[in-house]
Image (cartoon, rainbow, N blue to C red):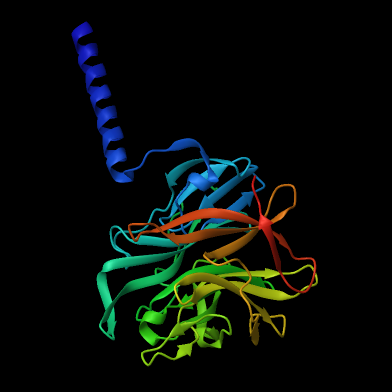
Amino acid sequence: MKKLISHLISGFFAAFLLILNVSAQRSNFIVKENIPLDSIRLSDPCILADKATKTYYMTGTGGMLWKSKDLQLWTGPYKVAETDPNSWMGKNPMIWAAELHEYKGKYYYFATFTNRDVKIDTVRGNVIERRASHILVSDKAEGPYVPMQDSIYLPANMPTLDGTFWVEKGKPYMIYCYEWLQNWNGTMEMIELKPDLSGSVGEAKLLFKASDSPWSREKDENGNVVPNKVTDGPWLFRTKTGKLGMIWTSWVYNVYTQGVAYSKSGTLEGPWIHEQEPVTPPDFGHGMLFRTFSGKLLMSVHSHKEDKNGRYIRIPHLFEVDDSGNKLIVGKRYLP
């Protein structure tokens, strides 16, 4: 009997170690604790201040999740996105610019998914992979986030990215970018969502084009200075005076830069009027806004700088923001 029990215990322990090993292979990361914000390498940082758990949750490109009680020290990363390997995303999609939104008692994971094994177009020598903004859902801020009813929100023949969330007159919308790689003049667009965000409704509508920007810059093939063709990272907000605005990111030559536009009508339909100058310092972009549990409005962005080896290093940063007037004013760096 003792030998049998010993074998059972040994077998159970071996199985337990196997499960741990498989889990480790799948995740391929180590959860760390008490990591300072500026020690994390993360593009497109989005922070959800979850009142239910009194916890800040941060995600972004890569799709992993970090947790913090004070914005200063973080624990993570955790894998929280569970995609369907039989869907258009494939077995191991790349995840860009993930966002978390709480809406009607559930939590939604907006992100850009790319299936590198599927090619949808070739334009000017650039092969364009299957890429689209999509939404997952969870009952908890910490996930896991799983697929919903519709497998496709946006047209399969168009590369789209950086989808974000806005509610207007009781209707939910996704605002996203149609990537410049296909049309060489990126656009900002919107599409209505189903009431439970499980799919999209109707056709997309154009909000503005990259070429509408007065502050972005690049040189075309003839050496002429023109607006940059990139649209990136939309985030909508309303000032305390009721003005609807959108921060979004492009480039001034090789400098990652964030601007702001305001809707003349006060609705998503626009027209969208762009401020003449960027809203944040050079080399900061893809921002979003959130309020701390004490009510302070902050902007989360990443810095975008090249190291001596030519690699881009992207680090999350926080800025103080004033929205009391008609226009958003970005203040000094916020150090928790």
Q: Quadrant of the C terminus?
A: top right
Q: Is residue 258 left or right of residue 81?
A: right
Residue 73, percent from left and from top: 56, 39
- Can the viewer see residue 138 in this picture? no
Q: Is residue 196 left or right of residue 265?
A: left
Residue 212, percent from left and from top: 56, 87
- The residue that appears at 53% across and 51% down in the rendered structure is 58
- Can the viewer see residue 220 in this picture? yes
- In this rendered view, identify the residue nearer to me: 235 or 137: 235
Residue 273 sits above or below residue 111 on the image? below
Q: Is residue 231 left or right of residue 52?
A: left
Residue 266, percent from left and from top: 72, 80
Residue 11, percent from left and from top: 22, 22
- In this rendered view, identify the residue nearer to me: 11 or 133: 133
Residue at the extreme front: 308
Residue 114 sits above or below residue 33 on the image? below
Q: Quadrant of the N terminus?
A: top left
Count up the numbered dots. 0
- The residue that appears at 45% across and 67% down in the rendered structure is 134
- In this rendered view, identify the residue nearer to me: 256 or 286: 256
Residue 174 sits above or below residue 301 on the image? below
- The residue that appears at 31% across and 39% down in the rendered structure is 23
